[in-house]
Amino acid sequence: MRPFRHFYQNGIRFSCTRCSACCRYESGFVFLSDDDLMRLVNALNLPRHEMESLYCTWVPSGTIDRLSLKEKPNLDCIFWDNGCSVYESRPLQCRTFPFWDSILASAGAWERVAKDCPGMGQGTFYSFDEIENMAKQGNARTLIQRRRNTGRAL
């Protein structure tokens, strides 16, 4: 039996052009880990509770809520202002784009996203192992969450 081969088995190219296509125009969640939140707290020089109050929202997911960045009414990321205003401190989810399981699921999924992202297929070469490592990083992080209806962190 032939082993499963990913479309990126021989590597792929990606370089962020900072076009902001992944940050604007459609709804999506940027879920945060403690590391993500603290990186933003430090970059913005805000107390944690103020960062959460101004820039975050709780998103229901089953019996828990997960902490996510807010979106503006037009669906842009809360930190988009003619580009990412926190680019150097952006969450891991943003830093590992487009190496997410949903995009790496198939060549078709990759190509659908690439239609809106000029950096996909361009620039820096990533080997299979590098791509897998970035996907694993995203999957391994522990997201900030709380029990629904209690407001207490888990």
Image (cartoon, grey):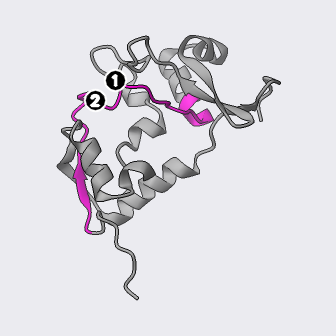
Residue 48 position by quadrant? top right
Identify the residue at horizontal 80%, vertical 26% (top origin).
Answer: 152
Let me know if residue 15 is in the magenta part.
yes
Tag count? 2
Q: Is residue 120 left or right of residue 71?
A: left
Cα distance, mark 2 to mark 1?
6 Å
Q: Quadrant of the C terminus?
A: top right
Identify the residue at horizontal 46%, vertical 18% (top origin).
Answer: 71
Q: Is residue 62 left or right of residue 20?
A: right
The magenta span reads 10-37
Amino acid found under the numbered disc labelled 2: Ala
**In the rendering, which numbered label is found on residue 146?**
none
Q: Quadrant of the N terminus?
A: bottom left
Q: Is residue 100 visible?
A: no
Q: Are marks 2 and 1 in contact (CB under 8 Å)?
A: yes
Amino acid found under the numbered disc labelled 1: Arg
Q: Is residue 15 left or right of residue 65?
A: left
Mark 1, residue position: 24
10 or 60: nearer the eye?
60
Up-down: is 23 above or below 44? Answer: below
